Image (cartoon, rainbow, N blue to C red):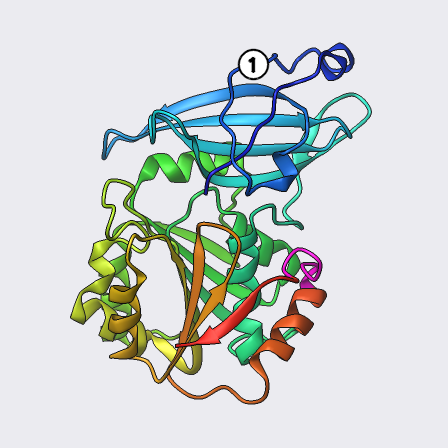
Amino acid sequence: MWWILALFSSAVAAVHPAFARQDDLPNTAEADHLNHPTKLQELDVMCSRLSDDCYVIKQALKKDFQVVRFMEQQGYSKSKYHAISAINMKMDSSGNVKFNHGSITIDYIATMIAAPYMTGALEFGRPGHVLRIGLGGGSLDMFLHSQQPQLRITVVELDPTMVELAKKWFGAVDDERRRTVIGDGADFVVKAAREGTKFDVIALDACNSADEMFKCPARAFYDRETMESVKEALTDTGILVINVLSSNNTILYSTLRQYFAVCFSAQMQSQNQVTACMKNEPEGSVMKAFRKASKMLGFDSQLAYVNFVRF
């Protein structure tokens, strides 16, 4: 996702001097929550032990004193920054901040959360098992962890550095309801299928920024054995939800239709798109259920423009 950060006013710095002035920031029209004058504080830079990628953690204070913490991939582009994850923070009167996992700042993440409820893969108040492949800052799974405590959540992340960042700067936790597995997501789902492990939701958010054609999802998830395993690891009413960022979605759509009876693509304003696939036909109106779920999750105004189209 590409982010707008506008030039910053001196007024906020006077009120909260811990946020350093930034005068040379990238611009884009996607993230309205960062389109207003802000002050930025760089919190940390950590580099992966598996690749050449480095990640910058920043915190933005808006004029209304709302705080957003986000992670950028360093050097992703000479002219643009790539925000991998973001979370709203709560600030007290002393300027201290804490995690607010009850809200989602990025529309495609909110769409991925709401999509399983539109098909009945998840139901409010009913236990379920969610597998997330690709951690980022953990906003998707930590939202479900905080708002839907009846769910069990398994997260698989290849890069130990990303796990460290998510726990240190975005409040990701491991407990009896949520666990993080460090490993290859494709290998994990193949093993799960062989062992008969079932998930109500598989949320695929595993990307390779260096691969323009197969950026999100990464190329490994187009493999026949992997895709067959994803299908096998889903319950009969389960759903595969994918963060899609590719120069050619046709390849992905064609691949998915080989394995799933029903697939939908979300028409969105962001560069990241969301695709949802099921083994069986969902009951009732998908869009009616999506609107209801979005409202119950607190996303109704945020996702009012999203429309799922069958392909």
Q: Residues within 10 Å of mark 1 (few under 14, many from 20)?
A: few
Residue 230 at what x, y percent from top left? 30, 71
Residue in the foreground of this view, choosing between 49 and 82: 82
**Quadrant hosting residue 276:** bottom left
Where disc 1 sits, the SS reads loop
> Residue 200: in sight, yes or no?
no
Quarter of the image with the N terminus is: top left
Q: Is residue 180 above or below residue 94?
A: below
Quick check: 255 left or right of 118?
left
Residue 165 at what x, y percent from top left? 44, 34
**Quadrant hosting residue 190:** bottom left
> Which residue appears at 63% of the width and 41% of the height?
32
Judging by the rendered image, the residue that carries numbered circle 1 is 23
The majority secondary structure of the magenta stretch comes to loop
Residue 73 at what x, y percent from top left? 38, 32
**Quadrant hosting residue 31:** top right
Residue in the foreground of this view, choosing between 121 and 171: 121
Magenta stretch, residue numbers:
297-303
Q: Is residue 17 above or below residue 227?
A: above
Residue in the foreground of this view, choosing between 60 and 301: 301
> Which residue appears at 58% of the width and 26% of the height?
59
In magenta segment, residue 300: yes
> Which residue appears at 48% of the width and 60% of the height?
153
Q: Is residue 116 above or below residue 16?
A: below
Residue 222 at what x, y percent from top left? 22, 64
Quick check: 208 left or right of 306?
left
Quick check: 232 left or right of 283?
left
What amino acid is labelled 1 in the image? Asp
